[in-house]
Image: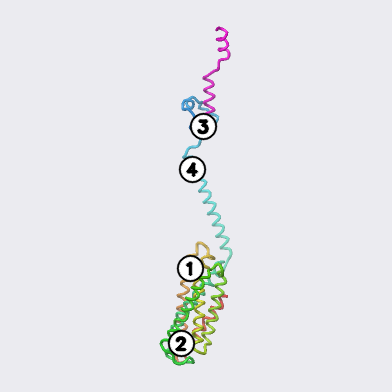
Amino acid sequence: AAVLTHRNQHHMIDMPKMRHLLGAALMCAAVDGFLTPLMPRALLARAPLSSPCRPPPSRHTRSVAARRSVLALRSQEQSQDTVGEDEGGRQGFPPPWLLPFLVPATGGALFGYDIGATSAVTRILGENAGPLGQLGAGEIGLIASGSLFGAMAASTALIGIGDKKIGRKLELNLAASFYALGTVLQVTAPSLTALLAGRVIYGLGIGTAMHVAPLYIGETAPNDLRGKLVSLKEAAIVLGIVAGYTTGAIFGSGDAAAWQPVYGCALPAAALMF
């Protein structure tokens, strides 16, 4: 018994010291986030205050760090936008979005021009018996609404065919071709039938241009100008209406009233769309 007691005292483990070391090890594991749910509170209380492990960051510290990183990213994006604006300002005139806007806007202006010009042409044909002869109310109504039939046909066809099969630029070129061909037929029409054919073909240009213009402007305009440019296309239609009434007032008044020049003034604008 004495020998066993001596051996136990000689090989006796220092339990307070082992608890101290075990508590420190568990503290390190808790800091790393592995054994936090399994760590006894008693061991945490006995762990030394001067632990070699770094304490875990609090929620406030993590949120502050996240805010700083977000602010740094925003400042970097703003600096890049400023550099892009400076580079865009150095490009000079015209800006890169101007020409892609003017082409479909011209198509809208020609649509408005037809509205104003046709009102003058129907007045001239109703008052004067020209090469087309004396026209009745029904015939004059067909002249006024001929472009609408063409516009409805073009819009219906484009909806059925789809834009992807044709492409925006090809649609604009088709609209310009219809505008130019219809204008030539209207100016050189020797009969009412030829005039009505020219009106329908011009209407095909209206339907094609009004179908593709908003899409083309929306795809080519910058993000910050997209809405403004689409609205300006509508303003181009109104300007075309004013131009049509003005041209009708110039060429459709007096003793030498003629309706051919009223329609013919649309040809230069149609040529600019190519």
- Earlier along the polypeptide chain: callout 3 or callout 4? 3
Quadrant in which residue 3 is drawn: top right
Span shown in magenta = 1-29
- Dot 4 alpha-carbon crowd within 10 angstroms: few under 14, some 14 to 19, many 20 or more: few
Is disc 1 placed on a helix, strand or loop? helix
How much space separates mark 3 and mark 1, taking CA atoms? 62 Å
Check the image and report above or below for 9 versus 31.
Answer: above
State the mark number for residue 252: 2
Residue at label 1? 230
- Here the colouring is rainbow
For marks 4 and 2, give the one nearer the viewer: 2
Q: Is residue 16 magenta?
A: yes
For marks 2 and 3, give the one nearer the viewer: 3
Residue at label 3? 35
Whether tag 4 and tag 2 are in contact, CB under 8 A, the answer is no
- Earlier along the polypeptide chain: callout 2 or callout 3? 3
How much space separates mark 1 and mark 4, taking CA atoms? 43 Å
Front position in the image: 121 or 196: 196
Is disc 3 placed on a helix, strand or loop? loop
Tell me residue 229's x, y (percent): 49, 67
Check the image and report above or below for 227 versus 15.
Answer: below
Q: Amino acid at mark 4?
A: Val
